[in-house]
Amino acid sequence: MPRPTATTEELLKATRNLVEAAKGPIAEAATLKTLAQSLMRDMDMLMKRKDVPEALRKEIEDVRKALKRTWADLKGEADGESE
């Protein structure tokens, strides 16, 4: 029995639905990235100040390292924890 084929209109509708469904997560990821970038700039400004105590400098560096990690790094860790 031949397989039914979708019309161009059906394919366009399905594509639009997929794009709409992805907007939420994409927008959320973009917002998180923007916030992280802003935080990095603020931490850079703090690190330029000479009056920031050494203990705070170390904490700031730890946060900066954490924010520079990629999704692949995080996924690799999550995969390792689930084993």
Image (spheres, rainbow, N blue to C red):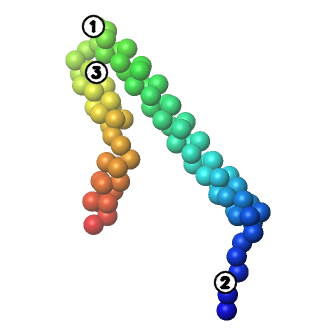
The picture quadrant where one finds residue 9 is bottom right
Mark 3–mark 1 Cα distance, whole angstroms, equals: 12 Å
Mark earlier in primary sequence (1, 2) = 2
Local secondary structure at mark 3 = helix
Nearest to the observer: residue 53 or residue 63? 63
Circle 1 is placed at which residue position?
50
Q: Which residue of the protein is positioned furthest toward the bottom in this rendering?
A: 1
| Residue 32 image position (x, y, % from top left) | 50, 37
The answer to whether the residue labelled 1 contacts the one labelled 2, judged by CB atoms less than 8 Å apart, is: no
* First along the sequence among labels 3 and 1: 1
Report the amino acid beneath label 1.
Lys
**Amino acid residing under circle 3:** Leu
Tag nearer the camera, 1 or 2: 2
Asked if the residues shown at circle 2 and circle 3 are in contact, with their CB atoms under 8 angstroms apart, the answer is no
| Residue at numbered disc 2 | 3
Q: Position of residue 63 (x, y in %)?
A: 33, 31
Q: Position of residue 1 (x, y in %)?
A: 67, 92
